Image (cartoon, grey):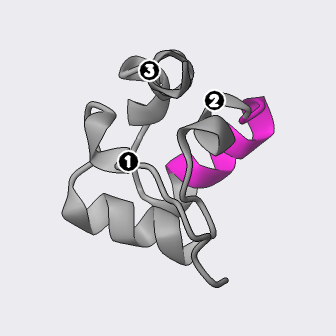
Amino acid sequence: TEAPAETDDLKEISGVGPVIEDKLNEFGIYKYEQVANWNADQVAEFDELLSFKGRIERDDWIAQATKLNE
């Protein structure tokens, strides 16, 4: 997936570093809005893809992304 012209700094989300940001980009995730709109199935899918063992929910990425997207 080609990156959009403007991307968000996903590293602002707690638990996301450069490596995880690169992986999210590989999966087409570039914007806070995308993370903020994940449903339970997507959280589970990315949790598994990133081998996070529940970290997305523990760190509440959706709430963080929603706030960062404001």
The answer to which of marks 2 and 3 sits earlier in the sequence is: 2
Residue at which label 3 appears: 64
Does the stretch in magenta take in 35? no
Q: Is residue 5 above or below residue 56?
A: below
Q: Amino acid at mark 3?
A: Gln
Q: Quadrant of the C terminus?
A: top right
- CB contact under 8 Å: marks 1 and 3: no
Label at residue 10: 1
Q: Which residue is mark 2?
A: 36
Q: Which residue shows up at 47% across the image and 27% down it?
A: 61
Residue 17 appears at what percent x and percent y? 21, 53
Q: Is the C-beta separation of discs 1 and 2 under 8 Å? A: no
Crowdedness near tag 3: few (<14), some (14–19) or many (≥20) residues, C-alpha within 10 Å: some
User: Closer to the N terminus: mark 1 or mark 3?
Assistant: 1
Residue in the picture at 49% in, 69% down: 25
User: Would residue 61 be found to the left or right of residue 37 on screen?
Assistant: left
